[in-house]
Amino acid sequence: MIAERWTRKMGGMVLSGLLGLVLMSGVAWGQSIPMEPMVSHEKQAPAFKVTPRKDSVLKFYPCTECHNIIPGNPQEREFKSFHLDIALDHGGGRFWCSTCHHTEERDYLRSSKNNLIDYDKSYRLCGQCHFQRQKDWFYGGHGKRVGHWDGERTIMLCTECHNPHSPSIKPVVPSPPPKVRSGLPFVPTEHHDNVRLWDKYLNPNNQESHE
Ligand code: HEC
Ligand code: HEC
Ligand code: HEC
Ligand code: HEC
């Protein structure tokens, strides 16, 4: 009895050891599609961590919660039930979901080689097409650092600021013009001549027309 239980336990240890090896080799468990490796600037830049998103911010992660049950459908189409809020405005009409989302391993993004990219390493996806911005970001020239100024660097993922489905930064609504300083009469600038404001007050001949 005891010997039997012991051999089972040993078997378990061998199995979890194997699992550990598989995980360490950078291959996601259960399949053989490799992870997209670091690009050279990521290795050379000072070490950094990112503000994670997949287990905190993303509302639909893990994707496999539904996509393990629903059959995949690579067809470009208008959605009827879920993801109705996603309006692709990226890539000038040449992208579909599968440009960036892995079709077989649904909890991952995909690289151009169809390798897996973790959602918390989405900069590896963006950098394939936006190499210069990614390089600046690695070295602190684009994006934002959070937390302490010294010690380990923590920086925001691209997706903190850019919606990957519609990434352009929308122009800010202009703030209202400043009020006329008190004491000065209001002088409308449009519908009037193009005389500069100060000329009007320096040259008394210009003033009657506004009384
Ligand atoms: C709550 C369930 C649910 C979750 C969670 C979910 N999806 Fe979906 N997804 C759906 C449904 C349902 C469809 C089919 C929609 C349709 O055809 O109208 C769909 C369709 C898609 C499609 C279109 C391609 C296809 O195979 O149908 C993509 C891409 C997709 N989902 C990506 C994701 C990603 C990425 C995540 C995780 C970040 C995710 N989904 C999480 C329900 C879900
Ligand atoms: C340019 C690459 C790109 C394309 C194209 C793209 N996605 Fe995404 N998608 C991403 C990235 C990157 C994230 C992770 C966003 C984040 O970190 O906030 C994401 C996140 C999502 C999520 C999770 C949102 C959440 O809050 O949980 C869903 C669902 C999703 N995408 C579905 C789709 C569907 C459906 C399409 C096609 C209509 C699509 N995506 C097209 C890159 C893309
Ligand atoms: C497969 C190539 C590809 C990938 C991957 C990709 N982009 Fe783009 N991106 C483009 C192209 C092409 C354009 C220019 C067309 C357009 O404006 O959509 C663009 C445009 C942009 C713009 C600028 C829009 C503007 O206002 O000019 C931003 C910002 C951007 N992408 C951010 C991202 C981020 C963040 C990611 C990663 C989540 C990403 N991109 C992934 C190809 C890509
Ligand atoms: C802290 C917020 C933030 C982060 C993080 C961030 N960006 Fe940006 N990004 C911006 C802003 C704001 C602009 C517009 C101003 C500018 O051009 O610098 C911009 C501009 C861009 C543009 C150019 C758009 C154009 O009009 O040319 C691209 C491409 C881009 N970002 C890609 C990325 C990529 C890729 C990452 C991650 C590696 C990233 N960004 C991370 C805020 C951010």
Image: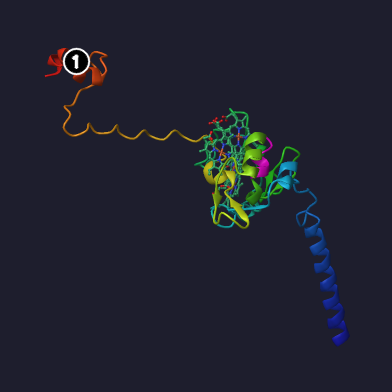
> Foreground residue, 96 or 49?
49
Is 204 situated above or below 158? above
> Foreground residue, 69 or 198?
198
Q: Amino acid at mark 1?
A: Asn
The image position of residue 76, as x and y in percent, is: 61, 34
The image position of residue 94, as x and y in percent, is: 62, 29
Residue 1 visible, this orientation: no
- Position of 92 with respect to 203 (left or right) is right
Tell me which segment is drawn in magenta: 123-130
Q: Is residue 125 magenta?
A: yes
Is 148 situated above or below 183? below
In which quadrant of the rendered view does residue 183 lie?
top left
Which quadrant of the figure shows ligand 3?
Answer: top right
The image position of residue 154, as x and y in percent, is: 60, 53
Residue under label 1:
203
Taking the spot 58% from the left edge, 27% from the top edge, the residue there is: 92
SS of the residue under disc 1:
loop
- Position of 177 with respect to 186 (left or right) is right
